[in-house]
Amino acid sequence: MKLINIWRHFHTITEHRIMVARHCFQVGMYWQGLTHDLSKYSPSEFWQGCRYYQGFCSPNNAERKDKGYSVAWMHHKGRNRHHYEYWTDYNIETHRMEGVKMPLKYVNEMIMDRIAASKVYEGEKYTQHSPLAYYEQGKDGYMIHPQTRALLEYVLRMLDEQGEERTFAWMKKHMVGKKQYPRIAVRAAHRRKEEAS
């Protein structure tokens, strides 16, 4: 492990946390902004991140290439509820692992996390289209609840088409501090289910 990678990894994860906090504060999610991704400083995540640091994408991918899995990611997703991977469970009716509907406050944080990650890794190349483009690359493999998927896609498309200011205003009005998903996500999930059957 290169010593410079310790500083670089620390700088990257701290820059990401600050950016997520800034976005969270803009919509009134103060506690989530302050506590976002604190587990990345724990030894089991931090030292793997330093060892596999690349600078242009998550070190978890390099660890996966090396080992076939990422210890840091497994530790991270089990402690951070803003990842849809946290919200999976065994369905006793279908006998399969399935996505569970995420509480809205974690969907909000997940969206801010995706925007900030795109900004950090893409740097000057980042545009409002980047988070949706990244999502589209791997969405077919996501084990995510249909309503959570519909809401995530709706907001990422809004960001893509209308920009950050209008998207954050919409989130603040319809998602932050709410218990129920906006109707638009529920309807979109039902529509998708009908089309699939």
Image: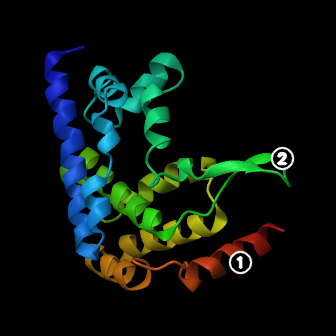
- Relative to 31, does residue 88 appear above or below in the rendering? above
1 or 2: tag closer to the N-terminus: 2
The answer to which of 189 and 27 lies nearer the viewer is: 27
Location of residue 60 by image quarter: top left
Q: Which residue is mark 2?
A: 95
| Quadrant assignment for the C terminus | bottom right
Name the residue located 39 percent from the left edge and 77 percent from the top edge.
Answer: 176
Name the residue located 13 percent from the left edge and 21 percent from the top edge.
Answer: 4
What amino acid type should be assigned to the residue bearing mark 1? Arg
**In x, y percent, where is residue 77?**
48, 42
**In x, y percent, where is residue 79?**
45, 43
- Relative to 1, does residue 59 appear above or below in the rendering? below
**In x, y percent, where is residue 85?**
55, 47
What amino acid type should be assigned to the residue bearing mark 2? His
Circle 2 SS class:
loop
| Quadrant assignment for the N terminus | top left
Q: Which residue is mark 1?
A: 191
- Relative to 65, does residue 42 appear above or below in the rendering? below
Q: So how many labels did they put on this image?
A: 2
Question: What colouring method underlies this structural image?
Answer: rainbow
